Image (spheres, grey):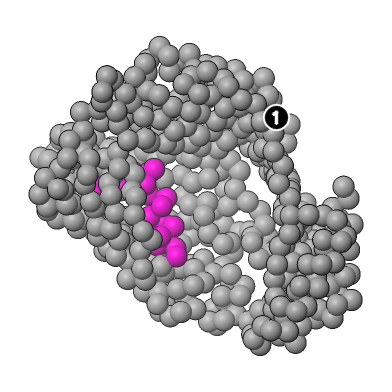
Amino acid sequence: MDYKHLLDYCLDKMAEAGADKAQVVLSVSEKHELNTENNTVKLLRSTEEFDLNFKFIKDQRAASTSINKQSTEAIDAAIEKLVDLSKAAPVDEASDISEFTEPKVFEIGVLNPNFDQVYEALETLNAEMKTNYKSIYGDAILSYDRRHKYVANSNGVRLEEVGGYYSFTMMFSAKEGDRITSFNYTGASTCELKKKLLELGALEELLDQSIKELDAKAFEGKFVGDVIIAPSCLEEFLEYLSGAALADGSLIAGSSKFKNKMGEQVASPMLTWHSNPTSAELAPGYTITGDGFVAEDLTIIENGVLKSFLISQYGANKVGLNRSGNYGNAFIVEPGEKSLADMVKNVKRGILLNRFSGGRPGPDGDFAGVAKNSFYIEDGEIKYPITKTMVSGNLFEFINAIEAISNRRINYGNCVLPWIHTKGGTISGQ
């Protein structure tokens, strides 16, 4: 399929329909995966997805829609729908399309996969699980993912990204006799399969912890103490912070606690947090933003000082700020100076939070949920795994109360994160 011709057809048809400005984003993805069940390869599967997104602006009224078909009949029908939607849309001067840049083609990650390595890596994992983790039951998936993205618009933008990577995920629990743990999971993306799969996404540590969780017990009582947030949980909290204070929604609504804080101290000086989609540390990141610009790396918080929002072209136009260099994710947090063991030694009373299950915090940053696959700490020692335990706190208070950041980080492919020790979490048991 000549996708460039398809994009030109879409733009020509929107121009014929009266668009003052028009933009098309085409995403084509392929996945070739091997699945295991209880340490045996069970399934080989290939899938493909096609997604075509349209943006149509006429008389400062914007409309958008998407389809998963590439026939001219489907495209024509989608554009007819866009015309009707735009007539009903309110006038909004903030709506726009990306500005002209020289045509560019980006190639990232793995373009020529080795499927023999994929099979061998899974078989090695299966053998190691059968030998060293006999009480672990779970399913693993190792895939090669290839993506192709195009952006074209009436300003002359022509951007293309082709990329590929290996993606590994595993979901598991431990079982011995009548005892069984809650499930846990991890994964990572990578551009090479030189490491064992057990070394990706802190899997070995999580498997060992899962076995210990066979002796988990319900925590009783309630206290305010320390929380060591594991990398597996930190990404979720950073995404919550982004939504509450850095992205379009909160800035447009005026609810962001950071809205007038650019250049000011908003977190502990220990915290330096980047969004680096083009970093060589990631496997891979991305080169084109969701609103059709070339992605740039940026620092969100440097030594506790707010350096950048994560705001799109629309959000920037709406609130009178500059558009950010990217739309977030690809988070990298700079390491600290202490080992995880030393961080634990400095906890009088608290928990190691490995997984959080709760609702998305509001603009004030308050959160509450269940601490999953987590451990109780007292007097500098990890005492036992916990169940039926709630954890609550405030994200903005957490990033200001940081006691330490680990010198070791976990690279998940899409982010690189340490452990963070903070204070002020409310731990509630039965």
Callout 1: SS: loop
Q: Is residue 384 magenta?
A: no
- Rendered position, 259 above or below 71: below
The answer to which of 425 and 216 lies nearer the viewer is: 216
Q: What residue is rendered at 27% in x and 46% in y? A: 371
Quadrant of the rendered image containing residue 22: bottom right
Graded by Cα atoms within 10 Å as few (under 14), some (14 to 19) or many (20 or more), the crowding at tag 1 reads some
Q: Nearer the viewer, residue 359 or 295?
A: 359
State the residue position of label 1.
Answer: 113
Residue 132 higher or lower than 4, as above or below: above
Closest to the observer: 323 or 208?
A: 208
Left or right of residue 42: residue 45: right
Determine the residue positioned at 51% across, 28% down: 140
Q: Position of residue 386 (x, y in %)?
A: 21, 39
Q: Is residue 250 above or below residue 339?
A: below
Residue 221, image x, y percentages: 10, 49
To which quarter of the image does residue 10 belong? bottom right
Residue 234 showing in the rendered view:
yes
Query: Which residue is the extreme one toward the front?
Result: 178
Q: Which residues are magenta?
A: 227-243
**Depth check: 143 or 292 in front?**
143
Disc tally is 1
Image spot of residue 349 (x, y percent): 13, 46
Taking the image as shown, residue 163 lies to the left or right of residue 271, namely: right
Please name the predominant secondary structure of the magenta segment in the image.
Answer: helix
Residue drawn where x is 38% and y is 66% of the image: 305
Q: Is residue 356 above or below residue 119?
A: below
Residue type (three-letter) at the residue carrying disc 1? Pro
Left or right of 429, for residue 257: right
Q: Which residue is pictured at 61% across the width and 25% down the height?
A: 43
Residue 307 in view, yes or no: no
